Amino acid sequence: MSIHTGNYHKTNDFNKIVLERRSVKVYDPQVKISREEMREILAEATRAPSAINMQPWRFLVIDSDEGKQKLAPLASFNQTQVLTSSAVIAVFYDAHNVEYMDEIFNKAVELGYMPQDIKDMQLPQARSYYASLTPAALRDINMLDSGLVSMQLMLVARAHGYDTNPMAGYDKERIAEVFGLDKDRFQSVMLISIGKASKEGYPSYRLPVDTITRWA
């Protein structure tokens, strides 16, 4: 078994990252991603945008054999990805992410990203805005932001030389509890398998731009 402590085959080539990305179903089970590199991947993914920079996404990285065996029964027809990948990243959003609002704004000032007077103006507005949201509206915002970070995570993984596959076919109702998380607070978004493909993913047809686009 080879554990990679550095980047596998890192690239900054836009075409390789975006246009050659494939959804991979079968991985080389001998390739493991070090937790150090996984932290790099996650840190780079979290440069994705989010509403008022609230960053509601949370990650559960399942990279141990024990964790994968626990996840496999929940993953229905996605068990091959679970069992052969280097890791599966379960993406959640934190329904209580407003608890981090002060930290986010205060750190922005401390690091010189935001002037104090702008923080003093925007923070009360942000609190008022989030307090006014219905549960459905808050869920919509958090799901959108979590989708943005998930796509960015897959592109970052590709830049590090790894392959991925986003998965919705699993037991979203049970996954938080099975892994000891508060299911009311941590809402499941998707699973993303990551590793090195042992079988290349297939290209897929995309609708023409003229079919999906209107100009105004």
Image: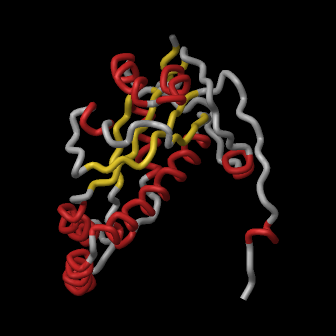
- 205 lies left or right of 169: right
Residue 161, percent across and down?
Answer: 61, 35
Answer left or right for 114 relative to 124.
Answer: right
Towards the viewer: 55 or 116 = 55
For residue 118, what is the image quadrant? bottom left
Residue 25, image x, y percentages: 62, 29
Q: Position of residue 121 (x, y in %)?
A: 23, 87
Q: Is residue 198 above or below residue 11?
A: above
Residue at 47% over, 42% down:
41
- Residue 173: image x %, image y %? 33, 42
Q: Quadrant of the C terminus?
A: bottom right
Instruction: Name which quarter of the figure residue 170 lies in.
Output: top left
**In the picture, residue 34 is in which quadrant?**
top left
Residue appearing at x 39%, y 66% in the figure? 140
Image vertical order of residue 98 relative to residue 86, above or below: below
Closer to us: 127 or 167 = 167
Residue located 46% across and 59% down the image: 48
Left/right placement of residue 80 relative to residue 186 reads right
Residue found farthest to the top: 1
Q: Answer above or below: position of 132 versus 16.
A: below
Front one among 112 and 152: 152
